[in-house]
Amino acid sequence: MAERFDPSVYAYAHRGLWTIDGPPENSLAAFLAAADHGLGIEFDVRPAADGIPVIFHDPVLNRTTNQDGPVETRTGAELTGISLIGGGTIITLETLLQAWPATTPLLCEMKIDGDTDPAQFAGSVAALINHHSGPAAMMSFSTDAVAAIPDHIQRGQLILPSSMNEASDPAATPTIDVDYLACHVSDAANPGLQSARANLPLITWTVKDLATCEALSAITDSQIFEGFNPALAKRHILNT
């Protein structure tokens, strides 16, 4: 069974420790590179046509592969044969869980779009996470998906940036029965979110430079970062 953990004890590589020159985002090589640096990882899962959770961010293949079309129209077997630009292939969640050393946490973001049923997909992902022997959590922007995560699995609520909806208050996102909140860097200083930190750890995403990392370290409990030195990221995020 996946272990619960304190999110503030770790820093998290956004889609693995990837670079423009490779390994690419959400690739097994990028994930294992993060593990080698003592980092947790954030990664994205979405369902293939046959329901198998595959690790891929976008709803379509175009940006990070040489193919096109929706991910949800291809089976897991078809998707895992597709090469990623920069090296490696699309992998399933099961493949990552088998390869992950289980010493640092997995933050598994469920992508809920297209025809994906939030509760059904959460159940499919949870069935795999449930057999993982290390620290792991599930999270989503979809409150329905988060609500469907079994109680024994650590769960987080991702919060859409308030800039996407000027009428929304990021701190108004339901926080009942979640273990942490994850907000956009632009909302980290929100008074309501800062108040919520008294009871729930606040992780921010995606931190893309050291200056932002330093600025947010005092008002967040951890960060999901990319694009700069992982040793410096760990130093400032964890205040070590």
Image (cartoon, rainbow, N blue to C red):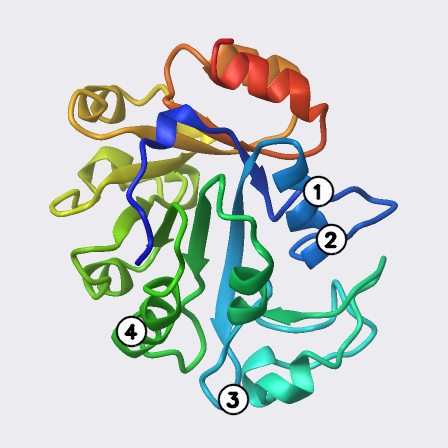
From mark 4 to mark 3, how far is it between C-alphas? 16 Å
- Taking the spot 39% from the left edge, 69% from the top edge, the residue there is 128
Residue 239 spot, x, y in % from top left:
48, 10
SS state under label 4: helix
From mark 2 to mark 3, how far is it between C-alphas? 25 Å
Residue 53 spot, x, y in % from top left:
48, 74
Sort mark 3 into few (<14), some (14-19) or many (20+) by Cα contacts within 10 Å: some
Tell me whether the residue at label 4 lies in contact with that at label 1, contact meaning CB atoms closer than 8 angstroms: no
Label 2 or label 4, whichever lies nearer to me, is: 2
Label 2 or label 3, whichever lies nearer to me, is: 2
* Residue position for label 3: 49
Sort mark 1 into few (<14), some (14-19) or many (20+) by Cα contacts within 10 Å: some
Is residue 8 found left or right of 93 in the rendered image? left
SS state under label 3: loop
* Residue position for label 2: 29
Residue 123, numbered circle? 4
Sort mark 2 into few (<14), some (14-19) or many (20+) by Cα contacts within 10 Å: some
The amino acid type of the residue labelled 4 equals Gly
Q: Sequence order check: which comes first, mark 4 or mark 1?
A: 1
- Taking the spot 11% from the left edge, 45% from the top edge, the residue there is 176
- Taking the spot 19% from the left edge, 55% from the top edge, the residue there is 152
From mark 4 to mark 1, how far is it between C-alphas? 29 Å
SS state under label 1: helix
Q: Is residue 172 above or below residue 196?
A: below
Tell me whether the residue at label 1 lies in contact with that at label 2, contact meaning CB atoms closer than 8 angstroms: yes
Q: Sequence order check: which comes first, mark 4 or mark 3?
A: 3
The amino acid type of the residue labelled 3 equals Ala
Residue 186 spot, x, y in % from top left:
46, 28
- Taking the spot 45% from the left edge, 84% from the top edge, the residue there is 51
Residue 168, numbered circle? none
Tell me whether the residue at label 4 lies in contact with that at label 3, contact meaning CB atoms closer than 8 angstroms: no
Residue 74 spot, x, y in % from top left:
61, 88
